Image (cartoon, rainbow, N blue to C red):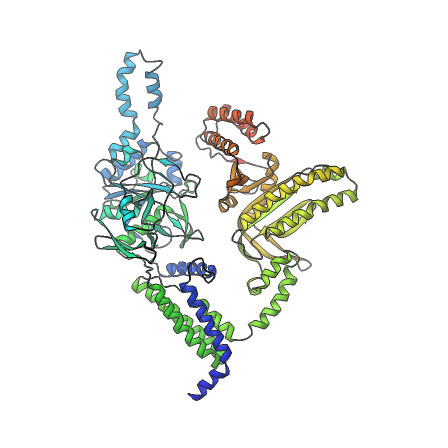
Amino acid sequence: MSRFFAALRRHGLRVLLSFGIVLLFMFHVIAPPDSPLAWSFVKKLELDLYDMRLNFTMPSTVDERIVIVDIDEKSISALGRWPWNRQIMSNLVHKLFDDYHIDLLGMDIAFPEPDNSSGLTQLEQLANGALSDNEAFLAQLPTLKTQLSYDQQFAEMMKDRRIVLGFSFSTLESRMKNVKAGLLPEPSLSAEEVEYLKLKYQTAGGYIANLATFQEQAFSAGHFNVTPDEDGVVRRVPMLHGYEGALYESLSLAIARAVLGKPFLEFGLKTSGSGYRNLEFLKIGARIIPVDQYIRALVPYHGKQGSFRYISAVDILNNEISLEQLKDKIVLLGTSAQGLSDLRTTPVATVYPGVEVHANLLAGILDNNLMDHPAYIVGMELVILAVTGLILVVLIPLLSPLLATLSTLLLSAGVVWLNLEVWQQLFLVLPLAATLIMILTLFLFSMSYGYFVESSSKRLLAHRFGQYVPPELVEEMNKDPSSFNMNSENREMTVLFSDVRGFTTISEGLNPKELSELMNEFLTPMTHIIHEQRGTIDKYMGDAIMAFWGAPLTDDKHARHALDAAMKMIQTLENMQPRFKARGWPEIKVGVGLNSGSMNVGNMGSEFRMAYTVMGDAVNLGSRLEGLTKQYGVQIIASETTVAAVPEYVFRELDRVRVKGKELPVAIYEPLGLREQISNEAVSELVAYESALTQYREQHWQLARDALEHLREQVPERLLYSIYLERVEYFMHNPPGDDWDGVYTFTTK
């Protein structure tokens, strides 16, 4: 024993610093979210480890109790574009309840607008106009109203049936935050009750609910909102969502209560130090639903897509399904079709139907096996960190490198095993990332070679990346050189292409020396702007610039930085024009294309020459978008993925296009500026244009033409309006058909 303590004394400084590392990780666990010790990378790893445990432990079987009636590509192809008329929906409800005898129908869709497809509105206009004195027509009108009132038929079909309607709330950040469509159901908790209980919750700015005539006939209703985590992955669903102070239950909760006989909703409350009462769980009958501080439940994914039987809606309408497949089942009506915007990123799949998210949560509620992450988990994590850290701090300095490595691996395996046992046996989500990172940190520190590795890698990093990025970024990368290398890897990044328009004409009008001076004057400030916005110059191609964001230094705001750079490049170039003119140089205009997505980045080339560059479809699309700037008469075009990543900007949607070399269409946008900097006139023009674009895509050609002509009169220099007017004129004489998707295909680069 004396030799043991003597050995520890010899390693006193290392042991002391190791204890400091353990304390840092313990402080991280209890630190507030905005504290410097609340390391974001640990949270990101924790999310990844949660997904790994979920995929490892999920049963991956088919739950026969719940069936998904799918508005899939097959059904849309057979019945036409969604939304279908209410006569089809009435027939579907009739088939499900009267022919197939289902138990309950939950709808992961909403019906906020009346159905005017029957022509009843036009008949009523004739009755009040041209045929107002036609007695035979007026005598038949009541009968026609009964036959053609599809909404009324649909509402009557819902009567006395166990149908749970769906609706959605719009977030306070969305473009539709103030939309109020349809009638909300009665809240689960009134604003007065919520205020009395002092609950925390997610709140909404607007909603898209169902027509009052439908809501009044439905058994109940629930919202189908989901809450993606910071990485965009759906792991939680708000069981209760707030609007104007009241709380409304989710679709899965409303269906579960309907299945269980509509038991009362009970609340497990705990008062926090701030005076708010946190809901620790909801209770319906004997079922416990653990929730977090914002009343969100973890989704117990049963498996990959297909953990519930999918049946095409058209097969039910055509009586192609046997009675046994649906009799007494809980049915969810939703969509897996690509174009209907209900596909989510989940821990089990990057493309996953939203309706199956609700099916998983419903099954978890009924089985009473939802995962929990209670407040006392923090205490459990602190104990594990302290015990694990103490073992490593004392043990590693006394062992050889080989034994220390084996001991560390064995301890890590034990921590993972314990975590999985708590997960599977107690249904508790015990954090794992901080413990594993602490183990790794202590091991690397105690091996005492980190300093030498770090020193050599710093020099190598400066040599490798100094030619691509500004010195400031190289210095920042030097702080953690082990995180960067030149090996090829896949990352989410943003690429920028810029090109001078009419460069051939410009070059023909200047001698070589003048052309060289002009390009230096142009490229130097453009490069400074890219560097200021943390960008990496890929290459210069004569008059063109290619740059990217997100590598070698990870940049969570790569899309915002790239867009800021593009806007500043255009503004700077405008400011340079008087100086160019004074020197007798021609005016320079550029087009800029931006795209965000998954790209291959690394050192690529041949044995003769290598370059740190990006490749992939997302890069090619960025180049194509730069070429489209000339077609639409704009200076910057950003793809839909870039737009989605920069909600601070206002954009004008230019088109949905299919560029040469790509099969899938993409929406393209022109950035207008930061939201707080956009003038009222620009907002009014944008609203009018979006309305015209909607009329165009819905093939209301005359309405679209009138709106576009009015816009062109107001802003004649905007080429976009003339482009759409030409298309409208063509389609008025050559209708594209009902299957037209509104996409414009480019056959050249």
Which sits in the foreground, 731 or 274? 274
Q: Quadrant of the N terminus?
A: bottom left
Q: Nearer the viewer, residue 539 or 320?
A: 539
Residue that protrudes farthest toward the top in the picture: 133
Report the front residue among 348 and 428: 428
Residue 283 drawn above or below residue 719: below
Residue 286: x %, y % from top left:
21, 55
Residue 542 vs residue 448: left or right? right
What residue is drawn where x is 35% and y is 19%? 125
Tell me, yes or no, if residue 325 can be seen here: no
Give the answer, above or below, for where 715 lies relative to 581.
Answer: above
Q: Identify the residue at horizontal 28%, vertical 15% (top origin).
A: 138
Q: Position of residue 109 (x, y in %)?
A: 34, 40
Position of 201 relative to 43 (above/below): above
Q: Quadrant of residue 412?
A: bottom left
In-image side of 565 versus 77 (left or right): right
Total count of labels: 0
Image quadrant in which you'd find residue 472? bottom right
Horizontal side of 469 relative to 393 (left or right) equals: right
Answer above or below: position of 577 versus 193: above
The extreme bottom residue here reads: 2
- State the residue in front, 105 or 188: 188
Measured from the top left, where is residue 700 in percent x and y? Answer: 45, 26
Q: Quadrant of the C terminus?
A: top right
